[in-house]
Amino acid sequence: MFIKRVANIKSSEITDEKLYHSRREFIRAASIAAVSVAAGVAMPDGLLADSQDRWPKGKKGPYDTDEEVNTYKEITTYNNFYEFGTDKSDPSEYAQNFKTSPWKVSVEGEVKRPKVYNLEDLLKPYTMEDRIYRHRCVEGWSMVIPWHGFPMSALIYRLEPTSKAKYVEFTTLLDPSQMPGQSRSYLDWPYREALRMDEAMNPLAFVATGLYGKSLPNQNGAPLRSVIPWKYGFKCCKSIVRIRFVETQPLTTWNESAPNEYGFYSNVNPEVDHPRWSQKTERRIGEFFKRKTLMFNGYADQVAGLYSGMDLKKYF
Ligand code: MTE
């Protein structure tokens, strides 16, 4: 995001991520193995955990991609969660003590029964499912993540927005005592994102409460976050405490901070470059070669109709 301008680029971003990690892990493994063999002791379990901890291959549900899923370690240590710092490794390091229970979610605005829900009551009616989605960041990296959660449409049906509701806005917790990044003013806190109602009702839009079949790690937005697979990652709002239905298009965090760089729609679109870099290709974390970015992140069949007749260069 724009803060990158001033940040130093880490060598892990220049070297291909997998080579970088595997080289480090190889050196580490080789030295531990050498010591272990010399000392006649068994290899520590944790050493092999990342390569073994792969989500089973293959498409299961109608919305899944059958591309290879990233490792649990990649998904949980390379994050954007500016409330915990701007480096990719900051969230996994600094979100460990973030308190996600008890948790309340306030439902407000153009809705029949505004209410503050305890998280357990909000989640109770839903059957959780796994969905393997492509995740594409505006910075040009991507992952494939097996989320665990339920369709956003199911939540919206139940909350019964009024006919005036045209957009739904999600807000992250504001608590600088727990989220050190919120004491700095690089974004206007709390983090806010929003969707047009028909986008939110699309069967691909998802509310995640977990990944890799486990509950959501703090760094990935515990205890609940939105997942919009055809949009750049910043449209997903982490650690949601407020869902508000509104009549007019809300101002969202990144759109407010740099309107020429981050539009309201933010659909993945290889034809519309970010003002400072191309969006034509992406680096899948764990791969060496860059791959071509797909329109709507590969979900055009399911979502292109939402934008028919719109100039996507103007409404980027
Ligand atoms: N939500 C909050 N509250 N704070 C953030 O900094 N970063 C966004 C999005 N949601 C962000 C957020 C960005 S830029 C991306 S790419 C995704 O979260 C990253 O999600 P991940 O860390 O689970 O991959």
Image: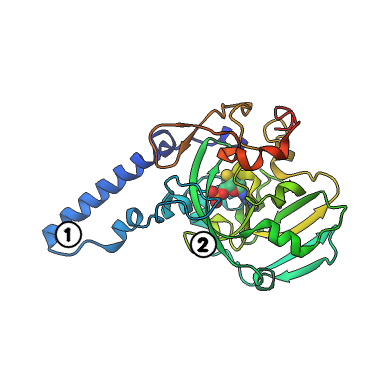
The answer to the question of whether label 2 and label 1 lie on touching residues, with beta carbons closer than 8 A, is no
Relative horizontal placement of residue 3, taking residue 28 as reference (left or right): right
- Give the answer, above or below, for where 204 lies relative to 122: above
Helix, strand, or loop for circle 1?
helix
- Give the answer, above or below, for where 29 lies relative to 136: below
Relative horizontal placement of residue 159, taking residue 9 as reference (left or right): right
**In this orientation, does residue 61 appear?**
yes
Q: Residues within 10 Å of mark 1 (few under 14, many from 20)?
A: some
Residue behind mark 1: 36
Q: What residue type is labelled 1?
A: Ser
Name the image colouring.
rainbow
Q: Where is residue 243 shown, x and y percent of the image?
A: 75, 58
Residue at the image position 74 percent from the left and 59 percent from the top: 156
Residue at the image position 26 percent from the left and 47 percent from the top: 26
Q: What residue type is labelled 2?
A: Gln
Q: Residue 263, which numbered label?
A: none
Residue behind mark 2: 96
Would you identify the image quadrant in which residue 1 lies? top right
